[in-house]
């Protein structure tokens, strides 16, 4: 009689290489905003922090460069990629049109359970505004936007917008570090959520378009100031 297969370890992932380990750790830091645009990356510091030699760090940095997340220059070495002003403008134009379109789908397709979850997510962000830092609020904001998009089109949310957001809008570049912006953004979120609840297609689309355009303008102003 044959021995039945042992499935105890089916869910155990194989160990990753040191290069893979460094790559995934650095990419997560970039996504979370721990490493900021323009910041210089010191290979010896990365190696010491992760407990690896120089070789896996170099290999991981090459992969991150191929993904466009870091850049090399003769004078500064490896740095976290900074977005040019014209690309920043184009990004927010793209976001404004995609999100104002997908919210139309969300209004038409949202179930009551989805509406309840979206309202709870919005209220949680309001509750966190006084206690969490800007990067954490930025992540909550991202997830709220992705929730709206996901109701309209899960494919666009997860395959288009999430990768785009995580690659080019790190949490360290948060706009949520100023009380006036936080207050205005929350008011705009409230108008967006209410329009979805009321099944107001045109109102929801207009609110989202205005909201993303406002954020884009604010980010461009700050980017010029930093430059």
Image: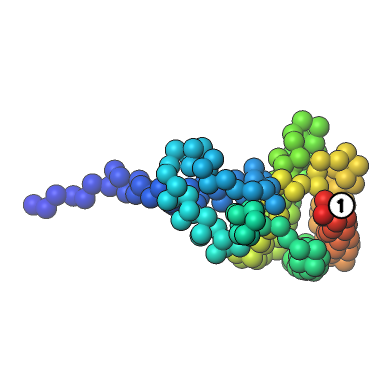
Whether residue 108 can be seen here: no
At x 44%, y 38%, the residue is 51
Along the line of sight, which residue is nearer the eye, 18 or 202? 18
Colouring used for the render: rainbow
Q: Is residue 165 left or right of residue 4?
A: right
Q: Secondary structure at mark 1?
A: helix
Please tell me in which quadrant of the rendered image residue 179 appears. top right
Q: Position of residue 30 (x, y in %)?
A: 62, 49
Please tell me in which quadrant of the rendered image residue 130 appears. top right
Q: Position of residue 178 (x, y in %)?
A: 86, 40
Q: Is residue 185 left or right of residue 79?
A: right
Along the line of sight, which residue is nearer the eye, 178 or 159? 178
Q: Is residue 27 above or below residue 51?
A: below
At x 56%, y 51%, the residue is 27
Please tell me in which quadrant of the rendered image residue 224 appears. bottom right
At x 91%, y 42%, the residue is 180
Figure disc tally: 1
Residue that badge 1 annotates: 225
Q: Position of residue 154 (x, y in %)?
A: 63, 62
Q: Position of residue 129 (x, y in %)?
A: 80, 36
At x 80%, y 43%, the residue is 176
């Amino acid at each position: 009689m044959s021995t039945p297969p042992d499935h105890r370890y089916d869910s155990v992932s194989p160990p990753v290489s040191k290069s893979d380990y460094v790559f995934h750790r650095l990419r997560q830091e970039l996504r979370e905003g721990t490493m900021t645009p323009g910041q210089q990356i010191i290979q010896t510091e990365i190696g010491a922090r992760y407990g690896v030699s120089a070789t896996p760090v170099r290999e991981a940095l090459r992969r991150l460069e191929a993904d466009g997340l870091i850049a090399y220059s003769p004078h500064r070495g490896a740095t976290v990629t900074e977005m040019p002003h014209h690309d920043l403008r184009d990004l927010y134009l793209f976001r404004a049109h995609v999100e104002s379109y997908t919210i139309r789908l969300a209004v038409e397709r949202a179930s009551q359970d989805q509406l309840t979850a979206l309202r709870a997510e919005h209220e949680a962000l309001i509750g966190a505004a006084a206690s969490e830092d800007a990067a954490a609020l930025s992540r909550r904001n991202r997830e709220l936007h992705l929730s709206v998009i996901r109701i309209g089109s899960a494919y666009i949310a997860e395959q288009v917008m999430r990768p785009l957001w995580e690659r080019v809008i790190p949490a360290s570049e948060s706009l949520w570090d100023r009380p006036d912006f936080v207050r205005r953004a929350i008011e705009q979120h409230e108008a967006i959520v209410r329009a979805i609840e009321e099944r107001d297609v045109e109102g929801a689309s207009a609110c989202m378009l205005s909201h993303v355009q406002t954020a884009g303008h604010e980010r461009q102003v700050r980017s010029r100031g930093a430059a």
